Image (cartoon, rainbow, N blue to C red):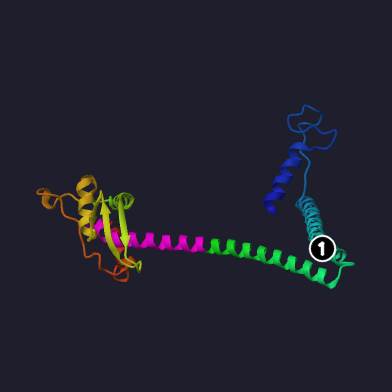
Amino acid sequence: MSMLSNLLSARLLFNEAPSGEGGPGSGAPGGGGDAPKFTQADMDRVVTERVRKLTDELKSLKSVAGEVEALKQRAAEFEAEKAKAAEEAELKGKSDAEKALIQFRKAEERAKQLESESAKSRADYEAKIKARDEAIAAKTKRYGVIPAIAAGAAEGAANTALREFLASADVQLDDAGEDVASVTYEGKTYEKVSDAVKAFYERVPFLAKPPAGGSGSPRTPGGPVTAGQKLREMSPEAALSDLFGGR
């Protein structure tokens, strides 16, 4: 409240000088005199009054919101009563057989509506499951190739190499979705991840580690990841540690 009080004090001091007394720079008589003084109590009173008004406005808005909810509930009740009255009017004067036929047709329509809603819910559920499975498969593929990519990447290029490899290679999982079964890169299928990564680095040597000692052919990327290795044996923590460790 202290800051707000100071702001209000400044506003009153510079913009609300009493009538007959010149404010700063006004040129009116008395302009060179002392500015009007306002106490902290005056400022607190102004702020308290504004807070009270805002609180009253908020209470009023909450009251209106409550009335709107009550009206919505009443409208729903009215629609239910209207539907019931329409049904009673439709059945009025009808024989028992006619009433049964009308009720049967309505039950049939309701069953079709429920079946349609159920089909939509099932489709939505299956879409969510598919999206989840695709996300899991993507992570499995990613963790399956990280060790080999990290082993052959140049300093600071591991992330770029991983992204480019996954974008250009087709990593296939086994039926259980736990193993990298094969990798197809540039039309050729490899049973070992390391062999596919080697072909990748030969294609983009600027992302690969320079040869040891500065001579010879580029280091062959590789690692223990093979088509038969389980995902649980490829610890994500260990893979990420290989990828980022020492950087």
Q: Is residue 211 left or right of residue 40?
A: left
Q: Is residue 123 left or right of residue 199?
A: right
In reply to whether residue 90 is colored magenta, the answer given is no
Q: Nearer the viewer, residue 67 or 92?
A: 92
Which residue occupies 20% across, 53% down? Answer: 198
Q: Please give the residue where the numbered disc 1 appears in the rendered image.
A: 83
Against 176, is 56 above or below? above
Quadrant into which the C terminus falls: bottom left
> Residue 175's x, y, as percent?
34, 67
Which residue occupies 27% across, 57% down? Answer: 183
> Residue 40's x, y, as percent?
75, 52
- Residue furthest to the right in view is 93
Asked which secondary structure carries label 1, the reply is: helix
Quadrant into which the N terminus falls: bottom right
Bin the neighbour count of mark 1 within 10 Å (Cα to Cα): few under 14, some 14-19, many 20 and up.
few
In reply to whether residue 150 is colored magenta, the answer given is yes
- The span shown in magenta is 126-152
Which residue occupies 24% across, 59% down? Answer: 193
> Residue 169's x, y, as percent?
30, 52
Q: Nearer the viewer, residue 157 or 109?
A: 109
Which residue occupies 79% across, 41% down? Answer: 36
Visible residue check, residue 245: no
Q: Name the amino acid type tagged 1.
A: Ala
**Most common SS among magenta residues:** helix
Q: Nearer the viewer, residue 173 or 158?
A: 173
Against 20, is 97 above or below? below
